[in-house]
Image: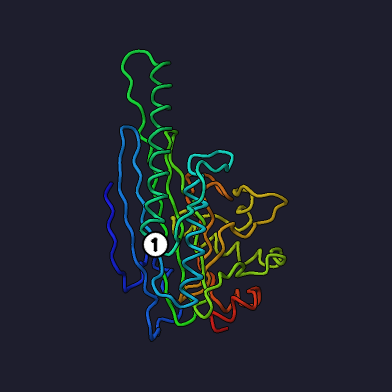
Amino acid sequence: MKRYSFITLAAILVMAAAVSCNTNSPKEFRTLNYHYSDSAEFASLTMDVDLPVGDDASSAAIRAKLQDVTDDILSRITSYENERFFPPFEGDRSDADAFLDYYHDNAFELISRLSKEDADERAAYSEGDFEAPSWRYEFTLNKIADTTAYVVFQSQDYIYMGGAHGGVTGRGCLTFDKQDGHLVEQMLDRSRVQEMQTILEDGLIRYYDEMDVKVERSELKEQLFIEDNTIPLPAWEPFPSKDGLVFTYQQYEIASYAEGMPSFVVPFAEIAPFMTPDARRICGI
């Protein structure tokens, strides 16, 4: 096993849109980065995790939530029915090394064992030369934005288990209030999705334009995988950036795999009327 850890003093910006809407932070939210990389005969596993450091109540609350996310995701990898494959960590959660070592060791044992079983089964039914696919799982949980009011962590993983292609999983971007560390569960009033249809249409048309695909508004909904002719809000909660709220739909959520993960930014001037009081407050609206 290879594991590295180091203090990160700058936000990890994985997309330009993730730059904070207020970067005048007098004190950066400090995190400790943990990186693991391992490979077995038919599988590989990497983990890249940022956890807050500090004993203040806000850091402790955010760290606890991120540990809950880590537990929930890594205990269920490769599961088609969302079942746990191993129990939660029962040690001292303040010992981040022990906590993450536990999930790495169990996740690596799981993917190594199941990929070997899959390879053996394929070999038993093969004729002639046979090359088993190599499974791959990448777990990422990184800080991507930090402002005076909030901090955003991105949970986005990649998994491949020998099919036609891999898939992106995870919880998306998690926005935390830096004052007390609570997760902003809802950025938008989801009961008003019908009122947001034009905003969502505009965003998707911009996405396709950036992909050099011309889609007329009259044809947009026919192209999408939606019900009742209504574009839903993404399952991943939108998160704030310097330019507005960032919307990201997962693979197959509203479009084909070939169309990627539709993503766009809606300016605060347009989306503010639909934001929750909690979201408006941390964004200074």
Q: Position of residue 74 (x, y in %)?
A: 47, 48
Could you tell me which quadrant the C terminus lies in? bottom right
Q: In the orientation shown, which residue stands out farthest toward the front?
A: 91
Nearer-the-camera pick, 1 or 214: 1
Which residue is at 33% across, 20% downward?
Answer: 130
Identity, as a three-letter code, of the amino acid under mark 1: Asp
Q: Residue 174 in the image: x percent, y percent? A: 51, 65
Question: In this rendering, is residue 107 above or below 63?
Answer: above
In-front residue for pair 186/101? 101
Q: Nearer the viewer, residue 53 or 94?
A: 94
**Residue that extends furthest to the top in the rendered view of this protein:** 127
The mark total stands at: 1
Which quadrant holds residue 249?
bottom right
Task: Give percent across and percent down for residue 25.
Answer: 40, 83
* Left-right relation of 240 to 122: right
Give the vertical position of 87 relative to 57 (above or below).
above
Mark 1, Cα crowd under 10 Å, few <14 / some 14-19 / many 20+, is: few
What colour scheme governs how the chains and residues are painted in the rendered image of this protein? Answer: rainbow
Q: Which residue appears at 45% of the width and 82% of the height?
A: 148
Residue at image position (68%, 65%) is 190
What kind of element bears circle 1?
loop
Q: Is residue 228 above or below residue 110?
A: below
Q: Which residue is mark 1?
A: 95
- Image coords of residue 57 (percent x, y): 50, 76
